[in-house]
């Protein structure tokens, strides 16, 4: 059954807007788990624009499911991951000027560097995922790196306004899922998914987990976090195994 991992970065975004103490991402993570999330995701960015180091430390202590630490492949983040010991790390590209993660990680040509980067994390039992576009070359490179999981970037599909462009992006993702599964990678999906556009994946088998933040937090403003997470969890669990 596909699982739902909830990204709580946007709770921290709201708190950082006033540099105060609320809303509290640690509480949001706890409520998300109570509502059926099977994982909690935090992206500790280099510029600390939303999630702070103390959030990661506290969520590590209070998380009852699985903590996914999203991060750039930098020495600083490697040290933090080794100290925090999350169940998963997901490597993402990071640019200071971007609003959110804008594209997948470039694995092609970086195989050895990323393999070396992940080695101490794998040695500690931390599992890895690489956030990549549904590009066959990137998928093959991810396998060469030796990651167990990839997370296919669904942002281009989610952002496409025009029907044909959207379908084209969707086809690329579905082909990418098949290719990755065929070469033994486990596949997660994430970025820009909401209660409607996620339905395109309902009959696609073998997706391990959906990584979702913004749409859940947006709905939570109207109906509360419990209901927003429950609705999404129910949806993904109704999808093909
Ligand atoms: N997966 C990755 C790798 C991301 O960087 C993000 C955004 O932080 C997400 C999933 C979640 O995207 P969204 O907030 O659009 O659901």
Image (spheres, helix red, strand yellow):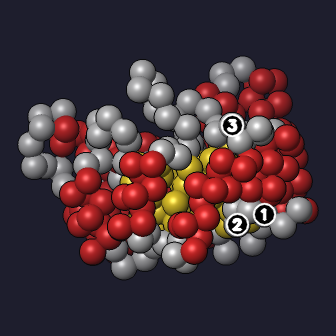
Q: Is mark 3 within 8 Å of ligand 1?
A: no
Q: In this figure, which residue is indicated by the disc labeled 1?
A: 185
The residue most toward the left is: 20
Where residue 18 appears, as percent x and y from the top left, is: 12, 34
Q: Is residue 73 above or below residue 29?
A: above
Q: In this figure, which residue is indicated by the disc labeled 2?
A: 148
Disc number lying in front (3 or 1): 3
Residue 3 visible here: no
Judge by depth and name the residue closer to the eye, 164 or 147: 147
Tag 1's secondary structure?
loop
Q: In this figure, which residue is indicated by the disc labeled 3?
A: 106
Tag 3's secondary structure?
loop
Q: Classify mark 3: residues with Cα within 10 Å, few (<14), some (14-19) or many (20+).
A: some
Using residue 68 as the reference point, say whether residue 204 is left or right of it: right
Q: Is residue 223 above or below residue 155?
A: below
In the rendered structure, are the residues bearing label 3 and label 2 in contact, judged by CB atoms less than 8 Å apart?
Answer: no
Where residue 54 appears, as percent x and y from the top left, is: 21, 57
In the rendered structure, are the residues bearing label 1 and label 2 in contact, judged by CB atoms less than 8 Å apart?
Answer: yes
C-alpha separation, residue under disc 1 versus residue under disc 2: 6 Å
Q: Classify mark 2: residues with Cα within 10 Å, few (<14), some (14-19) or many (20+).
A: some
Judge by depth and name the residue closer to the eye, 228 or 97: 97
User: Could you tell me which quadrant the C terminus lies in?
Assistant: bottom right
Residue 214 visible here: yes
**Where on the picture, by quarter, is residue 148?**
bottom right
- Residue depicted at x 36% and y 79%: 64
Using residue 86 as the reference point, say whether residue 226 is left or right of it: left
Where residue 72 appears, as percent x and y from the top left, is: 49, 44
- Which label's residue is closer to the chain start, 3 or 1? 3
Using residue 24 as the reference point, say whether residue 230 is left or right of it: right
**Where on the picture, by quarter, is residue 230?**
bottom left
Disc ID at residue 82:
none
């Amino acid at each position: 059954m596909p699982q739902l991992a909830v990204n709580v970065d946007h709770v921290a975004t709201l708190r950082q807007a006033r540099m105060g103490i609320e809303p509290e991402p640690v509480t949001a993570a706890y409520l998300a788990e109570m509502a059926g999330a099977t994982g909690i995701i935090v992206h500790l960015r280099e510029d600390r624009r939303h999630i702070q180091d103390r959030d990661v430390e506290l969520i590590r202590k209070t998380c009852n499911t699985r903590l996914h630490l999203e991060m750039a492949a930098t020495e600083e983040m490697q040290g933090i991951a080794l100290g925090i010991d999350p169940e998963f790390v997901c490597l993402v590209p990071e640019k200071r000027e971007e609003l959110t993660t804008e594209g997948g990680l470039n694995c092609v040509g970086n195989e050895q560097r990323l393999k070396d980067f992940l080695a101490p994390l794998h040695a500690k039992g931390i599992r890895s995922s690489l956030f990549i576009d549904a590009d066959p070359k990137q998928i093959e490179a991810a396998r060469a790196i030796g990651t167990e999981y990839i997370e296919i970037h669904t942002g281009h599909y989610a952002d496409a306004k025009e029907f044909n462009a959207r379908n084209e992006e969707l086809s690329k993702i579905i082909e990418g899922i098949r290719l990755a599964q065929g070469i033994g990678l486990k596949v997660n999906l994430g970025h820009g998914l909401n209660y409607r556009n996620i339905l395109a994946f309902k009959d696609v088998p073998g997706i391990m987990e959906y990584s979702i933040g913004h749409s859940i937090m947006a709905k939570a403003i109207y109906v509360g976090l419990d209901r927003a997470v429950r609705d999404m969890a129910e949806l993904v669990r109704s999808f093909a195994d």
